[in-house]
Image (cartoon, coloured by chain):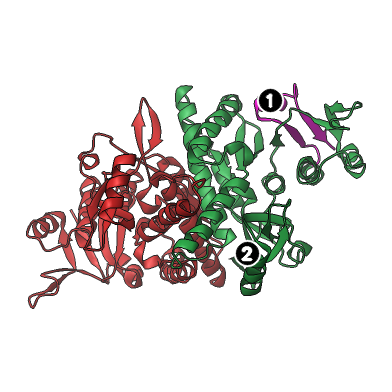
Chain colours: A red, B green
Amino acid sequence: MGKQLVIALGGNALGSTPEEQQKAVLVAAGHIVGLVRDGYKIVIVHGNGPQVGLIHLAFELARNEDQKVPVMPFAECAAMSQGYIGFHLQNALQNTFFSHGMTTHVSTAITQTIVDIEDPAFQHPTKPVGVFYSEAEAKRIAAAQGYQFIEDSGRGFRRVVPSPEPIDIKEKGTIRCLMENGDVVIACGGGGIPVYRKDGKLHGIDAVIDKDKGAARLAELIQADALIVLTAVSQVAINFGKPQQRWLGRITTAEAEQYSREGHFAPGSMLPKIEAAVHFVKAAPGHKAIITSLENAYKAVTEEEGTIITA
Amino acid sequence: MGKQLVIALGGNALGSTPEEQQKAVLVAAGHIVGLVRDGYKIVIVHGNGPQVGLIHLAFELARNEDQKVPVMPFAECAAMSQGYIGFHLQNALQNTFFSHGMTTHVSTAITQTIVDIEDPAFQHPTKPVGVFYSEAEAKRIAAAQGYQFIEDSGRGFRRVVPSPEPIDIKEKGTIRCLMENGDVVIACGGGGIPVYRKDGKLHGIDAVIDKDKGAARLAELIQADALIVLTAVSQVAINFGKPQQRWLGRITTAEAEQYSREGHFAPGSMLPKIEAAVHFVKAAPGHKAIITSLENAYKAVTEEEGTIITA
């Protein structure tokens, strides 16, 4: 039986147009095919930052031209991004498998991630999304819609949405079923469509879930053997970019937490990846998390590359 | 063991905004829950006409405001619509099952439908999509992009795309697996994302697949016991709207074809539903197709309502 891997693939690596994305997913597929051939059972959790932003932007701009175009909330835009990226990734994997004479099935499961409406993130939205507005426009929209805005990088005002913790994955049973069936499964895209539970029912909510945290929660729930978090570098470093920079080959969760406290990892960049990795290994002791680059994904699984985090 | 049903649900019935769609899918879920409770295994194929049109429109209008917004081809818009509608329908079914104390899983599979690039439909695009243009604009875009336009209903010029026959469903194995797992499966939305095969690989193409034909092909491929095509009326009629109008309770494929030849069914409305039903029953003799309304779906399965088409 193949070991089960959850692979988190960044949304930024997927480009910003359909053409760029189609090229990017073929590259990603090329680096994953070897693991599938070796019998690993794989769930891919892709990011969706640029894509969900583009879809939301298209609906916002279109409303300037035609007020009949409805407001498209973030949960629905996330669902669209799962279809859009899922299609391209699924298609690229299928075509790559065909080139290698493999008949492995590939499926994309539309996935809802349950968050807690009491999560403090809802009181402090931090994730900038969508287009830039002038201060006056931002104030007008904030008053009309109840949205929150921040000044972003000197380029204008942007809406901020909460980034709550993923609590549960509604479709985990479906994902497990497809994985056991031998499908390469694309799931929990963009961390999952954010929903909250009220009186037992699930409702979409304006939020963005961190994709690496969503992948870590999914890996925990389906008891994957390893969580592979892909990033721009082949290994994690401490003192990154400084003379005393040191690449990390194998660390424990305690060491990772110590380095985090010492400020070695950039918030919004390497830090959430480390946190996701630590979360998974603590929740599934004996299992491992790996942080590496797409190019080194295959070698990282056999522990020739990457930063391995264990209990 | 429950019998297997493929249910084709119209996209027009789903409204034209996220709010309308959320209400509509709850109504649909309320009419399907009884069949699930009775042990039927169900795949839902939803339409996506208004939704794929809205998504494509949003990208077209947004490009007027900001040329950096990329052209979003129809295959990608169809993929987005599968995520968007799938999320709402999946969520409504899950919430409805919860209300009934049921724990049935629901999943949405992003689905590609394979068409033949030699299909004559590609030489004669017939399906109007997207926004209306002036004659001058239409000519300019036609020259620049190679699109085809027609004058539509006196309201201006619209792009037309081909509506080819669905040949195969790439993800049929995944859909069958989920159905056998006991999931209510939402699949082949909008008839499926149109793709064609070239040198063994699949590529997206600008086309729109008839949802009822996609559902019929899927029902054939997974050997469903029945195909249920939902429409606005509880039964099919001959001489519809005339004094000698007669509702049809049970007909053979030969009778259905005879009535079709006699012009009893409107093209673009009842005719493709009849054709889809006949196609399925001919491909799976001994199985049946039912045409009825959403409200009568439950009773139609037990043959108390609807028009039943058999060999």
Q: Residue B246 in magenta?
A: no
Question: How many C-alpha atoms fall within 10 Å of the one at disc 2: few (<14), some, or many (≥20)?
Answer: some
Question: How many C-alpha atoms fall within 10 Å of the one at disc 1: few (<14), some, or many (≥20)?
Answer: some
* Frontmost residue, A129 versus A142: A142
Query: Can residue A159 be spotted in the picture?
Result: no
- Residue A279 percent across, percent down from the top left: 22, 49
Q: Amino acid at mark 2?
A: Ile
- Residue A115 percent across, percent down from the top left: 30, 39
Q: Amino acid at mark 1?
A: Asn
- Residue A20 percent across, percent down from the top left: 45, 70
Task: From the viewer's perspective, tell me whether residue A93 is left or right of residue B169.
Answer: left
If you read the primary sequence from the N terminus, does the residue marked by circle 2 or circle 1 appear first? 2
Q: Which secondary structure lies at badge 1? A: helix
* Frontmost residue, B165 versus B58: B58
Relative height, residue A226 to residue B90 (above, below): below
- Residue A12 percent across, percent down from the top left: 35, 65
Q: Quadrant of residue B37?
A: top right
Marked residue chain, label 2: B
Marked residue chain, label 1: B
Task: From the viewer's perspective, tell me whether residue A243 is left or right of residue B253.
Answer: left
Query: Which residue is depicted at the point 63% across and 44% down?
Result: B47
Q: Which residue is mark 2?
A: B205
Q: Which residue is mark 1?
A: B296
Relative height, residue B208 to residue B306 (above, below): below
* Frontmost residue, B305 versus B65: B65
Q: Which secondary structure lies at badge 2? A: loop
Which numbered disc covers residue A226?
none
Magenta range is B285-311
Query: Can residue B159 be spotted in the picture?
Result: yes
Q: Residue B309 in magenta?
A: yes
| Number of marks in picture | 2
